[in-house]
Amino acid sequence: MKTTGNLGLKKPEGTDNVDIADLNGNMDILDTAVKDVQDHAADTVKHITAAERTTWNAKASTAVATTTTAGLMAAGDKSKLDSVTQGANKYVHPNHTGDITSTGDGVTAIAPGVIVDADVNSAAAIAWSKLNKSGASLADLPTRSAADLTSGTLPAARLPASTGDVTSPAGSNVFTLTPGVIVDADVNSAAQINATKIGTAGITNTEFGYLDGVTGNIQGQLDAKSGIIDYVRQPAYATTAGNGVAYTVTLTPAPASIAEGFGITIVPNITNGPNPTLNINGLGAVALKDQKGVAYGQGKLLAGKPYMFRRVGTDFLADSAGGSGNAVAGDIRAGKTAATDAGDVTGTLPVQTGGTVTPGPNSQVKAAGIYDTAITVAGVPVPAANVLAGTTIAGTVGTMPNRSAENHHMPAVQSTTWAGDKVFLQPPNGWYSGESWVVTSATDLQPYNIPTDKNILGVQGSMPRQGTYTYAVTTAWDGNQVYVRIPQGAYQNPSGSGYPEIVLTAAQARADGNITPSNIRSGVWIYGQVGALMPVGHATINASTPGAGAPAGGWYELFRLPGGGRYANMMGTINWGISGNGQAKQGVFFYMRDEAGMNVKLHGGNVTGNYHDEITYSGFYLDKAERRITTYATMYSVTPDTGNWSRWYTDIGNNGAIPGGFNTNGQIIFYCYIENSLGGGYTYMSANGEIVYG
């Protein structure tokens, strides 16, 4: 922005932004200058009135008198005259030397350099023209330029000529106000007219101090003026830092934000990587894109080259599209030039002539280049179904499936077998390389499914052939069924006929461990075992306890087993039920008692609250010699570890063991004990069936 030569007023050019602060600053400077001029004009000491001017103009010539012409006396002559004593004679003054010298004519002179600061009176009011310009403040004013306003100095010799109401010749610091142009109303009381408009001839120390204050005021105004930060109208310029994908710059003055239209020319410090960004003064990374809004690919912004961008939306877009592309000479028609990322490139791609090409058994090569005339190739009819898929012949894309590529073991569409002769597999339609196989599923074609003397489609059988009579491997008894394990193999002869027989030994037939002489009636033969059991007796059991309302703590006999013998087998059921009414605890238990009164609990239970439970035991077997009593119950809480009695409420030990001290040889009474039966609930137990003992 330019400024005026005198007052430094700012003059915006056509491309500059007009700032109201600049206009106000210009008005303040003018206001101060005009006020100083008004004050000077109103000073009656420094100026004469019109009447005084008329009187002076009416006086005689003001020319200095000479030896031949009358006129005004010169100041020197007047001084000399006043110094002559009345009646004095002509006197020849002697010469002097030292600080003050004189010549034969009596004229004295002060030797150069002898006067120092202490010799000068503080009120001397030495004329401005007499000052040494090399030492005093503002002394070198005539050598200064307009730019020196920032230092508080004001040029004089460089001031241009001024015309109009206030005039001044070029290079002079003396300004003349045209008489009559300024009246009192023109001058503001606070105008503070710039002292540079006042002539410097005869300036006193007081006036010199005033002038220094005026220039200091100008300096203060300039120092107080804030810089203009407008990167929209005055785009910035900077060389980047950072890497090729995240450029950074630091601007002075620093912007407060990156506004819409923010302009900047950057010179990348390194060629860009993909999707570069620019971060200005740490205000955040903004994507750099071309004029179309497309992010730059790698290598588009070259190191050391200038690129100008504008903020548009969320991106920095290039100010102009410019040349772009990665074409090389061989990509461009010969003789033509194109602008690329690498600069202008002249093409070398030759121009060729077209023609007709007739397909044949041999290759026909057309030279590389650009063809300005058509190339005609005669059509060749090719059935697509006869061309392998993925292969194109004369423009026809094949549709024949490549079965070998699909599956090295291609499943057959269908299969059939001629019994005892051949197996036929139909492959899917398509092309086969000769290394593929057509397969069909045969999950049962296993060696273990084929007798050892047979081979089916290359699979040799491993299943053993069994004879007409085959012995069982093992047998087992679960209390209800006998399980016979036979050897693996084929139980038919090679012709597919025959009914094999499984042979069990007597020991295998006795899978149930209870098939022993002691458990078989005397004289009876079972699976090689001759019975030795001599029956003692048997009895029918049909007993039950009272139901609801039975007294608490009651013992109820169900049946008795006489003393003697080795065993007792109760065949029937033993049932018990228990229920609560929500008010009292209910309990019922199954005991056996020996002749000494020792009780052994076989089973029982109790409940509290509204709960009901019923359990049935399928009789029991008592082996007096082994001191074991076992049952056949299959309820949820039984376990073989206690002879199938419930493990929760029993005194019976492992495998039905009867506790020591209990006499199994004497009479045994089986009781039901009702622990509690109050309120509307009920508890009961019943025994029904036959008991055999011996």
Image (cartoon, rainbow, N blue to C red):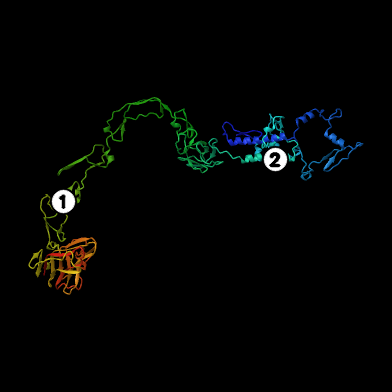
Q: Which residue is mark 1?
A: 453
Q: Is residue 244 left or right of residue 413?
A: right
From this view, report whether residue 63 is shown above or below residue 644: above
Q: Name which residue type carries label 1.
A: Asp
Q: Which of these two is toward me, 386 or 174?
A: 174
The foreground one among 656 and 127 is 127
Which residue is located at x 75 percent, y 33 percent?
A: 47
Image position, residue 51 (x, y; %) = 77, 30
Residue at the spot 16% in from the left edge and 56% down from the top edge: 487
**Depth check: 147 or 421 in front?**
147
Question: Is 464 on the left-hand or right-hand side of 152?
Answer: left
Q: Quadrant of the N terminus?
A: top right
Residue pointed to by mark 2? 212
Kind of residue sitting beneath label 2: Asp
Q: Is residue 15 left or right of residue 434?
A: right
Residue count near mark 2 (Cα–Cα under 10 Å), binned few <14, some 14–19, many ≥20: some
Earlier sequence position, callout 2 versus callout 1: 2
Residue lying farthest front?
679
Q: Nearer the viewer, mark 2 or mark 1?
A: 2
Q: Is residue 157 visible?
A: no
